[in-house]
Amino acid sequence: DYQTSFSLLKKSTYFERDDDLDLLARSYELGMETYKDCEKAAYIFSTLIDKKLLSKKNAAKLNDLGCQHYSKEEYARALAYFIKGREFKNTDSIYNMGLIYHYAKDVNKDLLKAKKYYLEVLALDTKYAYAYTQLAYLCYELEEYDEVLKYVKSSYVKAVDKNYILGKLYQLGHGVEKDLDKALDYHMRAYKI
């Protein structure tokens, strides 16, 4: 009986045995015998990480491990590593947390939470180009067109993204006066890059 097994497993984690915690986290990650809950799985995985990799020198390693899980679409495990990397102010980990919430990778899409993480990255490193780019796209989704313009005008945004976003703004008249000639010009620039 899987329900009984799951119930016993939850109780056994009171003793914090690593194998049981890992199995419980996997159950939440995959929705086996319980509801799928990436954030709960990430929390449990992070408890295991605490026991293994807690030092500032491992912050980049935490992000690398998170990226490995992200690439395998194991988002709960990835999030757990990124959360731990964030504790050491690792900008890559924080940025990746933003991506998980921005693009709803096994969590509910939360643009405000994603924006908070991208801004946190920029507070730590004002030259983090990808954060500017993602903020521009995210603010476009939130229909905060003045913010889009602010982020897209950053010298750190790649030319292809800058031209694409500006083309979209001029094409639809969002935050700027609608101008199809300018829109076409920006889209062509983006296409040629």
Image: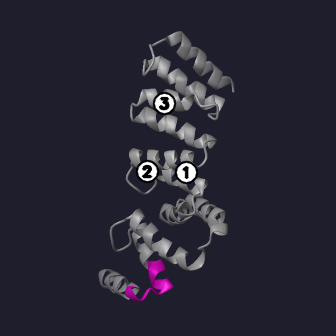
Crowd rating for badge 3 (residues with CA inside 10 Å; few <14, some 14–19, many 20+)? many
Q: Is residue 18 magenta?
A: yes
The residue at the point 56 percent across, 37 percent down is 133
Query: Separation of disc 1 and disc 3 at Cα?
Result: 18 Å
**Image vertical order of residue 12 relative to residue 152, above or below:** below
Residue range (magenta): 14-23
Query: Separation of disc 1 and disc 2 at Cα?
Result: 14 Å
**Image vertical order of residue 61 relative to residue 111, above or below:** below
- Amino acid type at circle 2 is Ala
Quarter holding the C terminus? top right
Crowd rating for badge 1 (residues with CA inside 10 Å; few <14, some 14–19, many 20+)? many
Q: Residue 165 location, x and y as percent?
A: 53, 27
- Amino acid type at circle 3 is Val
The residue at the point 41 percent across, 73 percent down is 27
Please give the label number shown on residue 95.
1
Q: Mark 3 sits on what residue?
A: 148
Which residue is most to the right?
A: 193
Closer to viewer: mark 1 or mark 2: 1
Q: Mark 2 sits on what residue?
A: 104
Quarter holding the N terminus? bottom left
State which tag comes first along the sequence, 1 or 3: 1
Q: Residue 9 location, x and y as percent?
A: 37, 84
